[in-house]
Image: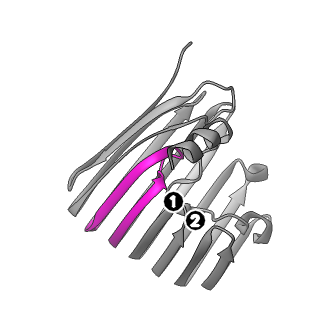
Amino acid sequence: MSGRIGGELGQLRPQTPERSLAEGDEQQLPDQASAGPEAYARTRATGAEAGVSAMRLRLRRLEGTSQLDGSLLSASASVSADKAEIAAHLGRLSGAGQVGEFRWQSTIEVLSAHASAALLNPDGSRGLHSRLGAALLGTETTASYAGNSVTLGASLGLSAGASAGLRDADGDGRLEACARVETPLVTVGLCVENPF
């Protein structure tokens, strides 16, 4: 397993945390907005995923540099070589944007439950990740610049998680070391690029 992880580190790119947009969704979205019930099931060489939402709202502007994604009464599950995850929530709203090299993403969830174990972490790094719990209310914001990023979150519930790994978010050949800790009240994450 370590050989596989090491061989892929140079090509790592961050995924949107908590799958704001799944692979392939971007080609399916209209240029401006879409709203309505959603159900999906996908299989790939690496695994499978499925989910359902009573209502899904997506809005994209400025040629893809900003987006808004919301859902109500949603549940999802995925299994692959990189992760196993199940999640459900009453409501979820996330937004993301980019100005030059500065990027941000914020998420708020109401009545959520989740369980996951993965080699691909929420910050896009590859290493080890585990998470388990439920929350009445939770919010999280990540700000990134030139490969470095900081994540701060707060929640009201019973949940815990941790992850650690490496990535190359900006593709400059210098790896970032990432760590993240989630407690019932606070989430803190940090990715720092090797300066040498």
Q: Is residue 34 visible?
A: yes
Residue 72, percent across and down?
A: 47, 79
Check disc 2 and report the residue beneath it: 69
* In-image side of 158 versus 165 (left or right): left
Q: Is residue 36 above or below residue 101?
A: below
Q: Is residue 104 above or below residue 77?
A: above
Give me the residue at 47% from left, 51% from top: 121
Q: Is residue 94 above or below residue 41?
A: above
Residue 84, percent across and down?
A: 45, 68
Q: Earlier in the sequence, mark 2 or mark 1?
A: 2
Quarter containing the C terminus? top right
Dot 1: few (<14), some (14–19), or many (≥20) neighbours within 10 Å? many
The chief SS type of the magenta part is strand
Q: Is residue 185 magenta?
A: no
Tell me which corner region of the image, top left, top right, bottom left or bottom right, holds residue 41.
bottom right
Q: Which residues are magenta?
A: 112-136
Residue 140, percent across and down?
A: 39, 51
Identity of the amino acid at label 1? Ser
- Which residue is farthest top? 196
Give me the residue at 47% from left, 53% from top: 119
Dot 2: few (<14), some (14–19), or many (≥20) neighbours within 10 Å? many
Check disc 1 and report the residue beneath it: 94
Identity of the amino acid at label 2? Asp
